[in-house]
Image (cartoon, helix red, strand yellow):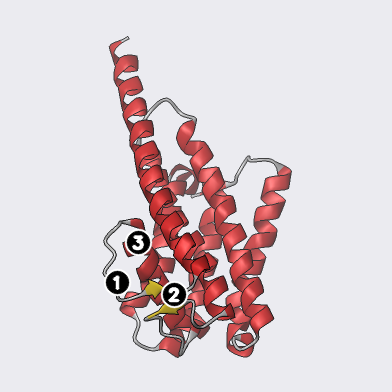
Amino acid sequence: MKQLFIKRKYELLLFALMQHLYMGALVSDIRFYIEVLWPINMLILSLASIVVFMKRGRAKTMFRNVMAIVVITFPILLPLFQKCPIYMFMLNLCYVIFFVFIFLEVFRFLVKPSYINTDIISAAACGVFLIIEIFVFVFQLFAYHNHTAFKGLDYTSPAYIFTDLVYYCSITFTTIGYGDITPNIHNTKLIASLIGVIGQFYSVVLLGILISKFTGSINSTKK
């Protein structure tokens, strides 16, 4: 079983990221989403990230374990402290650090091998969703600090803020941009432009990496 998890680690991480970001599409009870699903989502995501950091050194593993405990604990306590600004600031900051840490490890894997397989494809997709995760929580830092940070954002519940920003970051990353949610202060405007630039840059770099690996695989086969 352990070997299966190691072999499919990026596919498991991809599933965990997708269920964390988009599980809200299947849920109508927002209270249930906050109190039950979000902690479960983060538990699944934390467990999926364990395999990615296997054999990555003691320091990295320790840091990942500490961050995993933190990001699981925050949503469990959210119903009690969701109206506390300091708590929400720390929650979002820790999530940004957690997802940046995972993204750097995934990207490091992407640029190393000279071959292409399902792990590479899955890791590439993980990179997309990790960038979205990072910006969702960066935007939440501003949204909780200043309710005028966005126009069109539903501030009635942390779940609505999260799902609205997942939607906003997804359509901004993919350059669709419907315009129903828009940044309203200079901070969020500049960060919104940054996610568009990073989205394009990641896509171009990723395409180059995949083409290079595919070409390398063909050359290796011919030899």
Residue for badge 2: 184
* Helix, strand or loop under label 3: helix
Residue for badge 1: 179
Residue at 58% x, 88% y is: 79
Task: Please rate how many residues cluster around mark 1, counting C-alpha atoms within 10 Å: few if below 14, some from 14 to 19, many from 20.
Answer: few
Could you say where residue 3 lies in the image, as x and y percent from the top left? Answer: 50, 43
* Helix, strand or loop under label 1: loop
Task: Please rate how many residues cluster around mark 3, counting C-alpha atoms within 10 Å: few if below 14, some from 14 to 19, many from 20.
Answer: many
Q: Amino acid at mark 2?
A: Asn
* Mark 3–mark 2 CB contact (< 8 Å): no
Q: Amino acid at mark 3?
A: Thr
Residue for badge 3: 172
In the foreground, 36 or 132 = 132
Name the quadrant of the C terminus.
Answer: top left
Would residue 28 appear left or right of 68 to someone viewing this image?
Answer: left
Would residue 155 appear left or right of 46 to someone viewing this image?
Answer: left
Q: Looking at the image, is mark 1 or mark 2 nearer the viewer? A: 2
Q: Earlier in the sequence, mark 1 or mark 2?
A: 1
Q: Looking at the image, is mark 3 or mark 2 nearer the viewer? A: 2
Q: Amino acid at mark 1?
A: Gly
Residue at 68% x, 47% y is: 60
123 shown above or below 179 = above
Residue at 36% x, 47% y is: 200
